[in-house]
Image: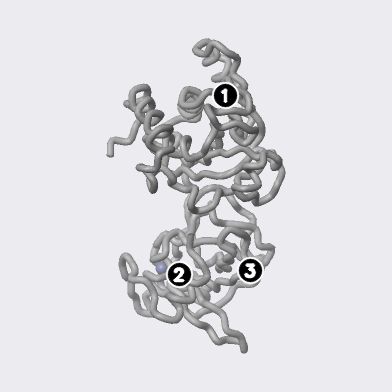
Amino acid sequence: MFTWIDILRFANNGNPTPLKRVEKTDEEWMAMLTPEQYRITRTKGTERPHSSEMCHKFEPGQYYCVCCGTLLFDAEEKFDSGTGWPSFTQPASPEAIAYHKDRGYGMYRIETVCNTCDAHLGHVFQDGPPPSGLRYCINAEALVKEASELRKATFGGGCFWCTEALFQNLEGVVKVRSGYSGGKAKHPTYREVCTGNTGHAEVIEITYNPAIITYNDLLRIHLHTHNPTTLNRQGADKGSQYRSIILYRTEDEQKEALQVIAEEQASFEDMIVTEVRPFEAFYQAEDHHQEYYNNHPDQPYCDVVIRPKIDKLKQQYGSKLKTV
Ligand SMILES: [Zn+2]
């Protein structure tokens, strides 16, 4: 995760090397941008707060630099700051943005610019939401949004070290995050979830491309890669945080989940006890729980519990796996 200290380091000691550079004359920028885009990005202007609808839009997608097309932010990191400017908690990559100390208006602030073309974007502050605590306050005029076809699914099937290690192998799955969902407590910690009192389950959030793998595929794979017939238990892991759960985002997903459970019931002797409930929030788990299997392949739990599950997945779903 990108932190305030990383930003200070860049602002004080020099910015990361950009992946590419784009340089144009003022005349060239003026010719390709609208007057307002030019004023903001090339002359360090600021748009009026609440002047863009972009502040209120949170659909999946990516935000690119209006001047050079570099990917700057993902909608996943966007939040409603109430300030009247689009706000993000993380950049798309550490190389995307450069940081400069800005002593304008009698304040010290950190200015953000596109690291590829030096377009002024806005500023970054330390008053954002957890976990990064950052608020990138960006002019909507400096950004172009492109909708993405990607969707999300949230499933729990016991320990998220296991489920994450399995689903990341599937073709069409672009990202898997481990976290907590299904309860009421806000921003729970691992320790709190382990007590079983938060109502949350250990879950994974799967970002996938439905053109390559469907929600239906994911549901079936989910049911067959954990034991959906043991209530509040997964192997040796006992407690409601290990329950089998599917969190749906639409009515169609709800219907599909119930349908798939009904169809797959025939392959289980005991009743499927998977909870199917509406998705409310996903809270990402602490950094050391992300990519646990990839980072600790030789740890006994990974070796004894997770690796056999991956082998089984390969046998059952070989054709759906990534080839690398
Ligand atoms: Zn740019």
Residue wearing tag 2: 33
Give the residue at the far front of this rendering. 300
Q: Amino acid at mark 3?
A: Asp
Task: Report how far apart the C-alphas of labels 1 and 2 lie in the structure.
Answer: 46 Å
Whether residue 211 is visible here, answered yes or no, is no
Front: mark 3 or 2: 3
Residue in the picture at 60% in, 43% down = 180
Q: Which mark is residue 109?
A: none
Quick one: SS at disc 2?
Answer: loop
Q: Which mark is residue 127?
A: 3
Please state which of residues 298 and 52 is positioned toward the viewer in this rendering. 298
Quadrant location of the C terminus? top left
Please state which of residues 104 and 240 is positioned toward the viewer in this rendering. 240
Task: Report how far apart the C-alphas of labels 3 and 2 lie in the structure.
Answer: 32 Å
> Looking at the picture, does residue 131 appear above or below residue 256?
below
- The colour mode here is one colour
- Tell me whether circle 3 and circle 1 mark residues in contact (CB < 8 Å): no
Residue in the picture at 65% in, 51% down = 187
Residue wearing tag 1: 256
x and y percent of residue 271 in the render? 60, 15
